[in-house]
Image (cartoon, grey):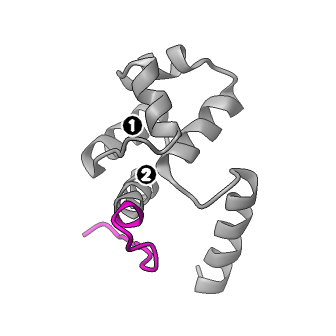
């Protein structure tokens, strides 16, 4: 996929999630799209309602390892969840000008 297409796709997703892509916004979109409560979704992920809310609001970061586990539990791309987790970490550290791209070895 070309960089131009990725950029357009990323911009479209950001429009629908009300801001830059993040793992928290992605999880919130999935949860809302499935019509489940914070409690139900938290149980699926194995975390509390309050912890999930903190992740969705960007108050807590998720490690790459947990992002991978969440993706498996939800049936989504591990690569994408890990990428978002790493990007969130860079953004938090003021390094948002860098964009993470990953591929399996």
Return the x and y of residue 78 as percentages of the image width and height. Answer: 39, 50
Q: Of helix, strand and loop, which one carries label 1?
A: helix
Can residue 103 be seen here? The reply is yes
Q: Between disc 2 and disc 1, whose residue precedes?
A: 1
Residue drawn at point x = 36 percent, y = 46 percent:
61
- Magenta stretch bounds: 90-105
Residue drawn at point x = 39 percent, y = 18 percent:
48
Return the x and y of residue 13 as percentages of the image width and height. Answer: 69, 59
Which residue carries the number 1 mark?
70
Quadrant occupied by the C terminus: bottom left
Overall secondary structure of the magenta stretch?
A: loop
Residue drawn at point x = 68 percent, y = 50 percent:
17
Relative to 51, residue 72 above or below = below
Is label 2 in contact with label 1 (beta carbons under 8 Å)?
yes
Q: Which numbered dot is residue 23?
A: none
Which residue carries the number 2 mark?
81
Q: Nearer the viewer, residue 20 or 93?
A: 93
Can residue 44 be seen here? The reply is no
Q: Quadrant of residue 73?
A: top left
43 lies left or right of 93: right
8 lies left or right of 39: right
- Please tell me whether residue 104 belongs to the stretch shown in magenta: yes
Return the x and y of residue 24 as percentages of the image width and height. Answer: 50, 44
Q: In which quarter of the image is residue 92?
A: bottom left
Return the x and y of residue 44 as percentages of the image width and height. Answer: 44, 21
The 10 Å Cα crowd at callout 1, few under 14, some 14 to 19, many 20 or more, is many
Q: Of helix, strand and loop, which one carries label 2?
A: helix
Q: Distance between the residues labelled 2 and 1?
A: 8 Å
- Please tell me whether residue 74 belongs to the stretch shown in magenta: no
Q: Quadrant of residue 71?
A: top left
């Amino acid at each position: 996929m070309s960089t131009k297409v990725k950029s357009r796709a990323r911009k479209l997703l950001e429009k629908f999630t009300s801001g830059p892509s993040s793992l928290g916004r992605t999880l919130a979109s999935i949860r809302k799209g499935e019509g489940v409560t914070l409690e139900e979704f938290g149980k699926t992920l194995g975390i509390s309602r309050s912890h999930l809310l903190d992740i969705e609001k960007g108050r807590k970061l998720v490690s790459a390892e947990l992002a991978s586990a969440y993706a498996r539990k939800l049936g989504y791309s591990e690569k994408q969840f890990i990428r978002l987790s790493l990007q969130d970490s860079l953004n938090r550290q003021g390094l948002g000008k860098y964009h993470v791209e990953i591929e399996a070895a």
